[in-house]
Amino acid sequence: MTRLTNDDIRTISNRLADYDRELVSKTGMTLFGIACHVHGRDHETAVHQAASFSIQVIPNTSGLGIITDFCDTVSAILAYLGFNSEVSPASDVAGLAHAFKSGADAVMTADDHTFSGFNLATRVVTDNSRETGRVFAAVLDCMAERGIKGERVLVMGCGPVGEAGARQLIARGARIGLYDTDMKKAAGLKSRLDAAYDKPGLLVEDSLKTALVRYGYILEATPSAESVPDSWAGAAKAMAAPGVPLGLSGTGAQIMKDRLVHDKLELGVAAMAVGLLP
């Protein structure tokens, strides 16, 4: 999980409605709808369940400590989605104890390395890196005119987010290539995917410049700014970018406009929350 900064999240709560409208215009689905799509849940049923499902967000003071407004922002996203959400008045273990005593259905909490959600009754655990990769892959499925099945998608970044996205894309029938500046990491992911799936037809790309010519879609899950050249943006079909910072320049992002989806927290939190529903 990328450790976000205060600047990364300070405006999220105030623009949730605007972002939701943006998602609808680009994907045909709301934030909550995309989260349901990735989990294969009926939208109406999930909306009904969320209304009576309580999630407490617990501050965690370990490591480098609390990012200002992180818990408030996560809780604001959950509330916008229709969940009964609040930030715990206690942190760390005391916060967990408070959640149990107050009858919360689930908790979410994060340290420097992991951001997870826990259903306190079913023991289901959702991980932000995994859910973020999965939900941004689902975004590409929504953006493709006839779905992502059969389309060529380049997964940039072969860490946990990229791997989760790659698995979701394979499950949806996409033809994927893998690229990472660390070739050993890309090769390792290919080996794991080859072992998990029946002849997925995976390729490891050793040249980004050459690879971009062959892929109309990108799942950009790198921690590098401007990793995708502006020259690709003009001809691209769509890009879903969970990577922080965004791998496009400001010019590239303007070129792509409605063909680009990027956020730093919203989609991942939505997918985590829907995944916690019973």
Image (tube, helix red, strand yellow):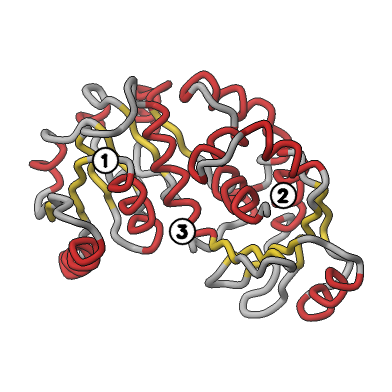
Identify the disc placed on residue 130.
3
Identify which residue, 109 or 228, lies in the foreground: 109
Identify the disc placed on residue 73.
2
Please tell me whether mark 2 sits on a helix, a strand or a loop. helix
Q: Position of residue 176 (x, y in %)?
A: 21, 45
The residue carrying pointer 3 sits among few (fewer than 14), some (14 to 19) or many (20 or more) residues within 10 Å by Cα, namely many
In primary-sequence order, the first of circles 3 and 2 is 2
Q: Position of residue 2 (x, y in %)?
A: 49, 61
Quarter-wise, where is residue 195 in the image? bottom left
Q: Amino acid at mark 1?
A: Gly
The residue carrying pointer 1 sits among few (fewer than 14), some (14 to 19) or many (20 or more) residues within 10 Å by Cα, namely some
- The residue to which callout 1 is attached is 173
Identify the disc placed on residue 223.
none
Q: Position of residue 193 (x, y in %)?
A: 23, 61
What residue is shown at x 53% (from left), y 72% (from top)? 113
Asked whether the residues under the numbered discs 3 and 1 touch, taking CB atoms below 8 Å apart as contact, a structural biologist would say no
The Cα atoms of the two marked residues, 2 and 1, are separated by 34 Å
Asked whether the residues under the numbered discs 2 and 1 touch, taking CB atoms below 8 Å apart as contact, a structural biologist would say no
Identify which residue, 56 or 196, lies in the foreground: 196
Q: Amino acid at mark 3?
A: Arg
Q: Amino acid at mark 2?
A: Thr
